[in-house]
Image: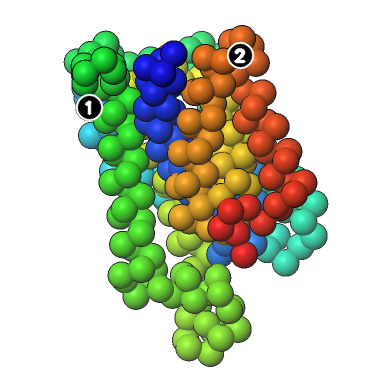
């Protein structure tokens, strides 16, 4: 039982790294723009489909193509923010929610029109391989996705903390009026933050493609988990997204061996409800 539980924790940490990468974009957008992007999981779907296309047309490995995916989804996110999200930043919250939900529906519909409702997948040389570390088995696909996620997370941390533009984004999040007085253009920071946030979701989609199917509504499978991660870590907290992602991954994985398969997400949802009820700011939220 101890070995089984330890194996579940290892698997949960590997999966949690991906959850953190998906959620970090959502929490970044909220921290800067104070808006919840309900279309975030659809940008993950876009990343998966673009990685699928590059794999089928050019034979590119989804993980190696992640930087291309980031650039493409970054551009799409910038366009969406500039021409749609920007218009409702000062509107009522219900207007913002309806807009992002509408964007989500449009993205799913376009994907269904182009790719149909079928499931698609790619084949990689390491897809079925695993590493044996003592009594434990580690999937190569999960390990590469976990490593790639942490590389992207580290690059994001460097960008936000070691570059002028990154510090300008953080300044805008902390005090918008003071940032304006310092010569920072908040509208440009909003576009950049939203584009980076959606780009991170696109990269997460490319990372998981070697072991997951892609279809137009695949984002629905990650949406609630993504919000659980953000709520647990704290809305607006980038480090919180990392910790929350790892915690949710472990909770989900351990629950899968203690509960029936159909109830494996039950504990995650209970944690989501309890966090909202008793600690709505999350572990690291402001």
The residue sitting at 51% across, 23% down in the picture is: 254
Judge the density around disc 2: few (<14), some (14-19), many (≥20) Cα neighbours within 10 Å: few
Closer-to-camera residue (122/156): 156
* Residue 174 visible in the displayed image: yes
Q: Is residue 57 above or below residue 186?
A: above
Q: Is residue 108 above or below residue 257?
A: below
Judge the density around disc 1: few (<14), some (14-19), many (≥20) Cα neighbours within 10 Å: some
Q: Which residue is mark 1?
A: 60
In this view, the residue farthest toward the bottom is 181
Q: Kindly indicate whether the residue at mark 1 contacts the one at mark 2 (C-beta within 8 angstroms).
A: no
The residue sitting at 28% across, 46% down in the picture is: 151
Image mark for residue 259? 2
Image mark for residue 94? none
Q: Is residue 266 left or right of residue 203?
A: right
The percent position of residue 187, horizontal first and vertical second, equals 54, 70
Q: Is residue 242 left or right of residue 258?
A: left
Mark 1 residue element: loop
The residue sitting at 52% across, 82% down in the picture is: 179
Q: Quadrant of the C terminus?
A: bottom right
Q: Is residue 270 left or right of residue 52?
A: right
Q: In whole angstroms, how far apart are the C-alphas of marks 2 and 1?
A: 38 Å
Q: Indicate the colouring scheme.
A: rainbow
Q: Quadrant of the N terminus?
A: top left
**First of labels 2, 1 by sequence position:** 1
The percent position of residue 162, horizontal first and vertical second, equals 30, 70
The percent position of residue 21, horizontal first and vertical second, equals 43, 43
């Amino acid at each position: 039982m101890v070995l089984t539980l330890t194996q579940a924790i290892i698997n949960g940490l590997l999966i949690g790294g991906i959850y953190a990468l998906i959620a970090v974009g959502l929490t970044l957008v909220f921290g800067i723009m104070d808006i919840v992007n309900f279309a975030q999981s659809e940008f993950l779907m876009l990343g998966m489909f673009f990685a699928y296309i590059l794999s089928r047309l050019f034979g590119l490995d989804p993980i190696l193509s992640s930087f291309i995916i980031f650039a493409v989804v970054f551009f799409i996110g910038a366009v969406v923010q500039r021409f749609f999200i920007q218009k409702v930043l000062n509107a009522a919250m219900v207007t913002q929610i309806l807009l992002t939900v509408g964007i989500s529906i449009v993205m799913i519909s376009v994907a269904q029109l182009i790719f149909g409702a079928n499931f698609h997948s790619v084949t990689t040389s390491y897809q079925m391989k695993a590493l044996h570390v003592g009594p434990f088995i580690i999937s190569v696909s999960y390990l590469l996705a976990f490593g790639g996620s942490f590389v992207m997370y580290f690059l994001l941390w460097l960008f936000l903390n070691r570059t002028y533009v990154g510090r300008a984004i953080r300044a805008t999040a902390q005090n918008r009026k003071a940032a304006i007085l310092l010569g920072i253009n908040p509208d440009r920071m909003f576009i950049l933050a939203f584009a980076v946030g959606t780009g991170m979701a696109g990269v997460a989609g490319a990372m998981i493609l070697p072991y997951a199917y892609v279809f137009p509504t695949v984002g629905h499978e990650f949406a609630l988990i993504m919000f659980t991660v953000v709520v647990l870590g704290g809305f607006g907290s980038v480090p919180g997204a990392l910790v929350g992602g790892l915690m949710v991954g472990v909770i989900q994985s351990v629950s899968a061996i203690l509960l029936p398969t159909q109830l494996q997400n039950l504990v995650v949802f209970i944690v989501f409800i309890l966090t909202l009820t008793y600690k709505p700011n999350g572990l690291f939220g402001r």
